Image: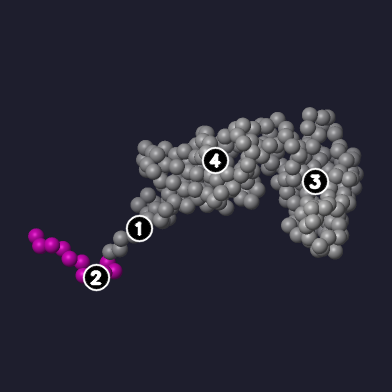
Amino acid sequence: FSDLVIHDREAYTLVIPPDPVLLEASIRVQGRVAGQVWVSRTAATSVQLTVRYFIPLSGSTLSVKIGRWNASAVTFESTGPIDDIRKASTTVSFLTPTNKVEGKYSIVVLSSTGSRAESSAGVIELVDMSRPRIDSVSQSESRASGGAVVLVGVTGFCKGLSMTCVPSFAAGVSFEMPDNSTKAAVVLGAVSLTAWQRNFLPQVPSFGDFINGLGPAYSAQFNLTVSSLEANVKANSGDGVTTAANSFVLAILTPTVAAATI
């Protein structure tokens, strides 16, 4: 037989497969999406993400690192044609390591065959949930003249106290000014997640009417704030300090400022 020569240059193309890509927008922490990717540093929390252009070879294993620490209970499921990696992806699930140093870390997915996908630095945060923290803010900016209503979700209050604990936020919310001074904001109302879930609002009887009275946009923002708190409680209840009873939604009236952060 003589050598086969293909003269049509477009009849066959050699393609270099793309490197695996960890899709940061796909990261889920029991319902929370990218941008809110934080977990309790003391509780193993379920995380799920997708790696594009990647299917582990048969018989290979995957490992996941959060910073320099190994995650546990790693499982994966792949979709797409095994003979065209450009159309393939793998969903990876794992539990975060516990009792590690608080901070922000990258996520790295490693295959036993050498493939690797890494997120940007600080994509996931290990948080000390025993301290009060701001869970979410309904909007990222408002007018400098003040008078805007902002909804803030907070957790970690009333730790170890009665389920009926109602902390006073009357003088506890302030804005940090550009010159590092602070300016107090007016707290229009506060309601615990437990009270809202039970439709039992003895501490703020008109809170629901107040939110609804602000209009559909604020009602929607309130529902998103509540959903974030609920996801936080579900994801981190294993730490023993994150509960619906110590999570609150605050409605605050912004002060007159040039520029500031809560």
Whether residue 13 is in magenta: the answer is no
Residue 2, which numbered label? none
Please report the residue visible at 70 percent of the width from the left and 37 percent of the height from the top: 129
Give the crowd class for mark 3: few <14, some 14-19, many >=20 residues within 10 Å: many
Which residue has dot 3 on it? Answer: 249
Please report whichever mark, 2 or 3, sits nearer to the chain's N-terminal start: 2
- Give the magenta range: 1-11
Which residue has dot 1 on it? Answer: 16
Nearer mark to the viewer, of 4 and 2: 4
From the viewer's perspective, is 156 left or right of 166? left
- In percent of width and height, residue 259 lies at 78, 60
From the viewer's perspective, is 128 left or right of 81? right
Please report the residue visible at 39 percent of the width from the left and 43 percent of the height from the top: 114
Nearer mark to the viewer, of 4 and 1: 4
Q: What separation in Å lies between label 2 and label 3 (alpha carbons)?
A: 68 Å
Task: Indicate the secondary structure of the residue bearing disc 2.
Answer: loop
Q: What separation in Å lies between label 1 and label 2 (alpha carbons)?
A: 20 Å
From the viewer's perspective, is 45 left or right of 5? right
Please report whichever mark, 1 or 3, sits nearer to the chain's N-terminal start: 1
